[in-house]
Image (cartoon, rainbow, N blue to C red):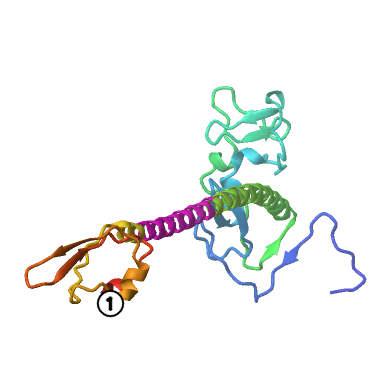
């Protein structure tokens, strides 16, 4: 090649390297697709070739000039709608259709139509570059919407996680309150039982030869009545108060 020669400005070519990894299209299963676009179609992330991106988004571009409709399609007065796929074609791009037949866009009018032709030399000419650029812009807009959806979903899940964390904390606090309250009630019940036992009237027979034990008599605050029993022994009936130690009763 002559280094002084100038490249043709009308046609620009890009040659792919032999080491390019072949990736299969997720729609047509074409294994020779060297260029794969990531798109989000109907809520599903897919990897599509250039032709499938354009076929699955017919309302986003003109099938003649491959102009991408970023916001809205052309007004009805400046467009022609395909009767098959509902794609929008510029009025100045399409040839005048016969009045007796409905309008069909190029992909619908030709069964063998292909947006992007794969050549053995892996060369992309100007027309293919325009087609590729249109598909890339469609994929970019699709993934931009996917980012917005993913961010909204992440924020929603974050709010749900915060709410679940708050509910779990409240449940633990309520469980701790019930546990402490139950322990407090058990302690009060135990103390009440001991108080009732101490206040119950007890009868202690003293058969110590009719003599009241000095240790017992010193700690007793009672009204006593002594009755003579057969055999000469005395039976002393004592009303025991809570101030009497339990050890004194055992000694008696």
Residue 44: % across, % down = 53, 51
Q: What residue is disc 1 on? A: 251
Question: Quarter holding the C terminus?
Answer: bottom left
Q: Is residue 91 left or right of residue 230?
A: right
**Taken as a whole, is the magenta stretch helix, strand or loop?**
helix
Question: Quarter holding the N terminus?
Answer: bottom right
The boundaries of the magenta stretch are: 167-192
Q: Is residue 215 visible?
A: yes
The answer to if 179 sits in the magenta stretch is yes
Q: Is residue 56 depicted above or below 234 in this figure?
A: above
Q: Is residue 119 left or right of residue 174?
A: right
Residue that protrudes farthest toward the right in the picture: 4
Q: Nearer the viewer, residue 197 or 92?
A: 197
Counting the numbered discs, the total is 1
Q: Is residue 123 left or right of residue 118?
A: right
Residue 217: % across, % down = 32, 69
Q: Nearer the viewer, residue 147 or 102?
A: 147
The answer to if 34 sits in the magenta stretch is no
Q: Few, some or many C-alpha atoms within 10 Å of disc 1 (few <14, some 14-19, many ≥20)?
A: few
- Residue ID at (26%, 72%): 212
Q: Is residue 114 visible?
A: no
Q: Nearer the viewer, residue 200 or 138?
A: 200
Q: Is residue 24 left or right of residue 228?
A: right
- Residue ID at (88%, 73%): 2
Label 1: which secondary element? helix
- Residue ID at (68%, 29%): 79
Residue 200: % across, % down = 28, 57
- Residue ID at (7%, 73%): 231
Q: Is residue 96 depicted above or below 149 in this figure?
A: above
Q: Nearer the viewer, residue 83 or 136?
A: 136
Q: Quarter-wise, where is residue 22 in the image? A: bottom right
């Amino acid at each position: 090649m002559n280094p002084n020669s100038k490249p043709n400005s009308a046609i620009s070519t890009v040659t792919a390297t032999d080491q390019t990894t072949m990736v299969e299209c997720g729609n047509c299963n074409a294994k020779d697709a060297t260029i794969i676009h990531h798109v989000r179609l109907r809520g599903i992330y897919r990897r599509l070739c250039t032709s499938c991106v354009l076929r699955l988004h017919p309302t986003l571009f003109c099938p003649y000039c491959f102009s991408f409709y970023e916001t809205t399609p052309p007004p009805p007065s400046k467009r022609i709608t395909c009767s098959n796929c509902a794609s929008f074609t510029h009025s100045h791009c399409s040839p005048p259709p016969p009045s007796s037949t409905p309008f069909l866009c190029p992909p619908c009018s030709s069964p063998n139509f292909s947006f992007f032709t794969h050549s053995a030399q892996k060369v992309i000419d100007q027309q293919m570059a325009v087609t590729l650029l249109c598909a890339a812009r469609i994929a970019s807009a699709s993934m931009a919407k996917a980012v917005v959806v993913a961010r909204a979903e992440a924020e929603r899940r974050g709010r749900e996680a915060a709410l679940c964390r708050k509910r779990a904390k409240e449940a633990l606090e309520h469980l701790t309150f019930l546990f402490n309250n139950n322990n407090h009630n058990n302690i009060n019940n135990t103390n009440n039982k001991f108080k009732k036992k101490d206040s119950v009237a007890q009868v202690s027979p003293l058969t110590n030869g009719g003599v009241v034990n000095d240790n017992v008599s010193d700690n007793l605050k009672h009204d006593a009545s002594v009755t003579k029993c057969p055999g000469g022994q005395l039976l002393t009936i004592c009303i025991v108060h809570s101030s009497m130690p339990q050890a004194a009763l055992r000694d008696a």
